Image (tube, rainbow, N blue to C red):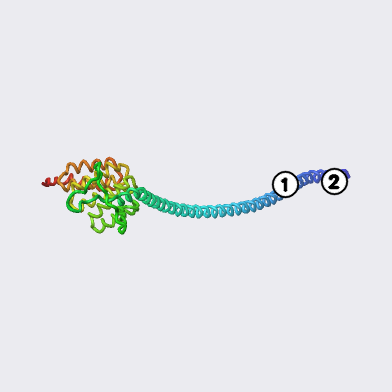
Amino acid sequence: MRKIYATAAVWAVLLFTTAAPAAAQNREHLQLAAELRMLQEQNQQLSLALTQLADTLKAVNARLDANEEFQRRRFADQEVLVKNLGSDLGTIRERTQDTDTRLRTLKDEIDALRQTFLTLPSLIAQSQMPAPLADPNNPNAAPSSAPGGVAAAVPAPTSAPPVLTLPPEAGLSPNRLFETAFSDYTSAQYASAITGFQQLVKTYPTAERADDAQFFIGESLANMKRLPDAIDAYNQVIQKYPTGDQVDMALYRRGYMEVEIGRADAARATWEELVKRFPNSQGAVLAKQRLAGLSRAPAPPAKP
């Protein structure tokens, strides 16, 4: 009987000792399962957050793309607007220059008419001056004089009113005078051209085209082979119009004429002066070419 009890006690101890580790392992498994479920839930939350973040990024990118497209179109429109404004400004500038030219021409015309009107009284007085009394017995004798040394006057016939003669340049503006003279120049009517250019220089010495007229006086004389006179005309351009736009070409042409009459050293000095004073002008470019030719070729003999 005691053996039976002892055996039962042993089995009870064995059952107890084996059941305790099994319960402990079961608790660890449950804890691990709970932690795993927590990790799964956190993973799902992170996945949801990542999805929301991706959607937000897509929305931001879409807005950035839309803003970039808007800015690009805006810049393109502004560029077109700036180009149009530039074109409009160019048109306005051209019209302003054309208007300015027209106003200067009109001013020259008015000045020419004013100058003509100012000379009219003296011209009328000259035309109305009575002719001196001639001796009918001696037509070749000098007119008789009244007492006091004053020539006797013959009354003007009523049937023939005095004729008022205006100078050929009366009422013509500097531009008109220049265009008329330049037309003669291009037609090789150099004598008439010189006369027209001289009238412009004499009547309007400070006009805008006075230096051009003086320069073409030299060109006309050069075409007529009057080279020393042409040099004098170019010198007038250089001396009278030092701020004009024909000085460089006047220096170049003066040097060319000096070479033609055998004064190569004077031509070299003229062209060197031109290059020094107006290094970027058209005349300087031509002068440099001529100077290079002078350095390679011997000076021509002086003409008698």
Does 58 sit left or right of 81 as displayed? right
Can residue 139 be seen from the camera position used here? no
Amino acid type, callout 2: Ala
Estimate how packed mark 1 is, as few (under 14), some (14 to 19) or many (20 or more) residues with alpha carbons within 10 Å.
few
Q: Which residue is mark 2?
A: 8
SS class of the residue under badge 2?
A: helix
Q: Label 1: which residue?
A: 35
Label 1, label 2: how far apart the Cα atoms are: 41 Å
- The extreme right residue here reads 1
Q: Residue 224 in the image: x percent, y percent?
A: 19, 53
**Which sits in the foreground, 87 or 55?**
87
**Quadrant in the picture for residue 192:** bottom left
- Farthest residue to the left: give it: 304
Q: Please tell me which residue lies in front, 64 or 157.
A: 157
Q: Crowding near pointer 2: few (<14 within 10 Å), some, many (20+)?
A: few
Total marks shown come to: 2
Q: Residue at x 12, y 47 (%)?
A: 303
Point out residue 95 in the picture as x, y percentages from the top left corner: 44, 54
Q: Secondary structure at mark 1?
A: helix
In depth, the one of 193 and 225 nearer the eye is 193
Residue found 44% across the figure and 52% down from its top: 96
Residue at 60%, 54% in the rendered image: 62
Give, as a three-letter code, the residue at label 1: Glu
Q: Position of residue 268 (x, y in %)?
A: 20, 42
